[in-house]
Every structure is written in C-alpha cells, then in structure tokens.
Image: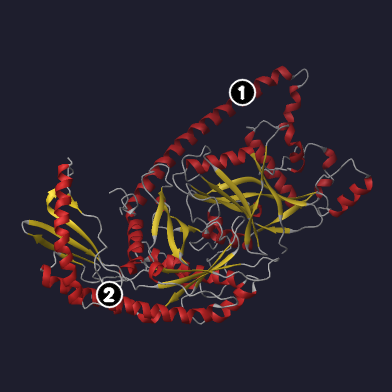
Amino acid sequence: MDDLSLERIDISGPTLASLIQRVSSSPGDVDGLIFGQIHRIVPSNLSDDSPADSVASSSSSSSGQLVATVTSFLCSGKTVSFYDPIGRVDSRRISSLGVDSPDRLIGWFSARRKTANRPSMRELAVTSSLSSQFQLPIEDLENPNSPANMASSVFFLLTTPSTEQLIHTHEYRAYQFRSSNRRVEPRSVAIVNIGPAFRGHYGTFSPKSGFPPLIYDLRSSAMNEDRDEGSLSAKKQALSDQKEIDALAEGLQVGYLKRLVGAEAANYTGGIEEMYERMLAKVESLASEVEQSSAKVFEQDNRNRKLRYRIARIGR
Amino acid sequence: MAFEGFPPLIADQLHYLLNHSPDSIKIENVCSGNKFNPKILDRFTLVIPYCLETIKWDVIYNSEYAMAPPDFIFGPDDEDFMPCSSVAPDDGQSLPLNKALSEWNNQDTARLLVLIQGLRDQYEIYQRRRVGQVDDDRVKFEISTVLTRKGIEMQMTSGVEKPEEVKFAVPLVMDMGINKLVAGCPWKHEQKIYLQVVYPILRKYESVPAAPRLKLVSSSDLKALFSVEDDVKLPPWMDGMCLAEYLPHLEETLERQILEAVSAIVFRRSFVEALALFLGRPLEADPTFCRKASFLAASGPFAFVVHFFFSSQFPKQQPALMLQSCQHLNQMSVPVKSNLLTEYPWSPRWEVGRMAERLCDFLIDEAANFKKYCNEALLQH
C-alpha cells in the first residue's frame, strides 16, 4: 500500500462540538475511535490567466488531493481501551466496543487534561499500530472504477492547557501517521458547517446514513413486475425493509397518502392525525425511558468509580 | 517532599524513583487531570540529568484508573524518539522496557524506576544515533576515536534559533575511586568528574572548525575536597587537536591534583592538632575534610571563639580567621564578630608546630584589638 498524504482533515461543526463536549464531561482522560471517509478531490484552480496555463495546471494535478472527513466518533470512556499499554491495537477489543462499521474507521483520538499538546509515546505507538491494521476505501467521484485503499492513519489529540493563565480552555490538533518515515505529521483541520460559505465543502461532502433504503411502491406498480424477477434475495430484502417501514408507520401504508389530496381528504386527515398523536406519545415515553436509564447509568458509573478508588486506595 | 495528593499506588512508585535513582531526578509541574476530584494528582514532569544538562519528560497517570501504567511525553525536540516496540525498529534493545509496560504491576513500587531507566537507556542510544548522523568530519572522527571509552553520553542540539551543536559528556578518572581515597567518606554516590565538550557544527561556508568549548563538571559534593572550577586549569586546546589526544594529559593532571587534595586533608588535620596544643581541644571541627575548626580562646577575662576556614590551597594560602565574642551581643542579640582576617605573618614553608605557634602569637595581639572593637560596637547603641 502506498503511503498517501492527506491534504487536510474535514470535520463537521456539530461532530467536533459533540466530541469536545464528550471529552470535557468525562471524569478523566479518555480515548476512542473516529469514523469517516477519504475522498479524492480535484482542486479547483481555475484562473483568469491564459487557458493554456490552466489546462496545464489541471492536468498536472489530475491525481487530486486526498481529504479525510470525520463524520462520527465513539468514545470509550477510559484510556487503554482498544490497545495494550505498549500501544498494540487489539482488533477484538475494537469490535467489543460495538463498532458496526469498521470499514469507516479512519483513526482514533486521545484526550487528556493539562498536558502538552504533542503526541505521547503510547499515542505514537497506537497510531502506528492502527494504521498498519486497518484501512478504508478512497472515494473517487471522478473515476469510481479505480478502487484504492488508505490506512486508518488519522489521530486527533485534544488537550487542555496546563497553565491556568491562558484564555482558551481546549486545544485540538490532528495528525496523520506516515508509514514511510514512521512519523506523525500535523494536518490542518477544516470545520465544515452548513451555510453559504461552505457550499464548496458540501460539494464533496456525502454523509452516509445507516437508514434502510426506502423502496417505495415496489408491489403496487404493475410496470415493475418484469424487472423484479431479478433475484429472490433482493425481493426478500425489499420485503423486510417494507415491513420495517410499515412498523414505523403503524400500519398506515405509504400508498394511502395519495388519498390526502382531493375529495376524500377530509375522511382521512383524522386517521393521519391520530397516527401522529400515537407516534408522539411513543416518542415521549421513549424519551422518559432514556432519561431514567441514563440516570441509572450515571449512578452505576459513580459506583464503579468508588470501587476503582477503593482498589487504588484513594481517599482513605 | 510530600506526595499526599497522589493516589497511594502512584506515590509509592514516585517515592521509590526519587530515592533509588542513580541520577538525582527532580519533579515539577505536578497537576491533576481529574474533573471531579482535582485534588487527586496524577501528572507531573520529571527533570532527569542527561549529558550534564537536563531533559524534561512528562509522566501521565490516570487517577481514574490509578492501576494502569503511565504514559510519557518527551521533549519537543525529540519527536523522533519512539522507544515503544510497535514503532521502533525491532532491535531487541527495547525488550525490557516493553516487558515492564505490558506486564505492569501496580504493587511493584520499583516499576516507575525500571521504566525511567529503560527509557533513559533508549534515549542514550537515540542521541548517539542522531550524533552519528551529523554530517561533520570532525565529529565523525571524534566518535570513532573515543568510542572505546565507557560511559560517554552524547547529545545533539538543534533548533530554529539555536545553532547546531554536538555535546559530549566524558567521564574522567573513572578508575581512581575518589570515594575510597577519602578516609571516613560521607558520600552516598560515587563522585565523578566529567569533561563537557561542545562542538559547534561547521557551516558550509566555514573552512576551519572552531575549537570546542570545554568545561569541567563535578558532582557538587566534591567541592568539599576540591573544586574543579577553581582549582583546575584546563590545558589549552591546540589547533587540529582531537579528544583522544587531549584527554590523557588532562586526566594525568586531574589525578595528580586529586591525590594532592587528599594529602592536603592530612596536612590540615595535623595543623588543627598542632593548634590544640596551644588553644585546647577544638569546640567543633570538620573531621573528614578538615575545612573548618573552631576553638575557644581567652585573653584575661575576655573569652572569645576563633573560627578557622581552610581553603583547598592550604598551606599555600593561610587559613582565614574570624573572632566571635562570648560576652558582647549587638542589638539583635547576635554575638559580635570580627571581619575575616587573612593578613598576618605566614609562610607555607614553616613546620606545622611553628605555624600554630606564630598564629597564636598573632591571636594574643589581635585579642586586644578585637576587645576594643567589641566595646566600641556596644557603645554605638
């Protein structure tokens, strides 16, 4: 595998904010995994100069730049979570953290308070070990038929300043591990937010969601009958997806929605409203359940901390 | 030093490290990374002597998981220093270090010391490799010729504002065993003398390498015997000289001077003993190095104490005297003292007995002056 260099690392504002929030609310140092994608983008270097120049420059940079986009993260709540004290990554411990999309793993982060903002001995070892074990595909919009992989080599370091006089309360830095010289190199971080200034970023930003594909009207249209002969498994998949959607809609089929328009509408609006009310009640009960369970998690967390302190003989 | 803020398991390891390390390690920047209990300390900086300078390593424990092994952050200039196995080339040298980390046992108080020593050994290898890569003919030659000497530490310093330099710390007169030469030696650690050699790295447009900067450094305890800064004059560094040529001559001089300093103790002791014939038993005397002695003296009813201070140049340089009255106190209730007296008849060629005799003659005269001085000091208030 080639040692490819990232041009920069993109992270959406909400992701970075929730990462900082998660880190600063934890009692001690934490680490975790970060997920996202690698894109190959063709830099737009159109200029008003003579066309010959611009053609030359665009052809020279036809390979494009690599940009890593961080879309989500998973915090372990402690340190030395998916690696051992010397920094060797254990893939079994990564799967035990509940990672459902290991093919989106682009790196990891470490957060520690009141320490210098450069990588530590163990962080270097973990970054190196992770990038030698995991890789993810590079998304290339220009020529999608040239599949290539890149090592999961991104490392985010979050610290707080060690002297209290400084105004800022958080520091973050991003690095990429290069296998050729066995070093981590700093990379610039671009924060992507929704808004006119970020339209350029969004051109290449394709967030992937875990929703099931919404296959609508497969059975109702007679025109589709021939095409659907394709494969049995695809059909089965479609059926199970449909069931999932039906369960969410409480038995109200999507097809009925067209009756909302026209003369019959008045008869059906009542039914729809009732469905929404039932759904809202469900959401509310779910919210209160979440609240109760997170209170329980918090209590258990405190109990665990007390036990840990007792083992470490703190506070006697 | 108090370690109350640390969790007990960490405090034990830190105690052991500071008390048992062969180098005198210091600790600073102690703080806590705990959000809910900021009084529980778990991170600090160790100041570790290396190559006659110090290096600072941050040690990070996690007070939430006090049983886990610590992590380290090295200096900003040492970003290539990666002693951990999965990164470092597998040369087998980092094995004990990896073992100490991966089989971490928080009950073993010696673990932190083992780690720090393992890391320091790795750091020495790393610095030696860096110095070996320097593109400078003189440094390459010096390394190849002094490599047979044991215990040389090297360091490469470079930076944006700092000039590139290679530093050597060469231990000298290792075989002498200075501690053994001193009777009743009070030193816990073996006393060592180092020569610090700093080579400026030749810039491309310079043709003649500048002479290296030389400095003798010793452990601070050695000053009681003799001071390498004041008593030793470094031989000059000739053009085109190399360390292998320079060192034997310097070591010869040093060895001779150390032996002289040791025999000077015997001479000082015999002088103090000779004084006792005239002044009686000393009130207080430094028994090991005989650098200080105090006697009680009297001139008629006026009683006073005489302090003797001996330089390492004794008997070439006469001892400095200070008189202290037993009967006069100034307004701060401190006994009145004379200034240091160094001007009195003296010859280094006299016998010890004669030295003592002449000195006591001088004291008899001086006692009258001192009494007058004391009375005047009292009258002023």
The reply to whether dot 2 and dot 1 touch (C-beta < 8 Å) is no
In the image, is A170 to the left or to the right of B372?
Answer: right
Residue B61 in picture, x, y percent from top left: 43, 54
In the image, is B333 to the left or to the right of B204?
Answer: left
Q: Specify the subunit that label 1 lies on.
A: A
What quarter of the picture does the C terminus of chain B occupy?
A: top left
Q: In which quarter of the image is residue B115?
A: bottom left
Residue A1 in picture, x, y percent from top left: 72, 64
Residue A91 at least partly seen: no
Q: Is mark 2 on a helix, strand or loop?
A: loop
Residue type beneath disc 2: Pro
Q: Which of B183 and B263 is in front in this view?
A: B263
Q: Return the residue at label 2.
A: B348
Residue B309 in picture, x, y percent from top left: 25, 64
Residue type beneath disc 1: Glu
Q: Return the residue at label 1.
A: A274
Instruction: Answer few, some or many: residues within 10 Å of disc 1's Cα (few below 14, many 20 plus, some between 14 and 19).
Output: few
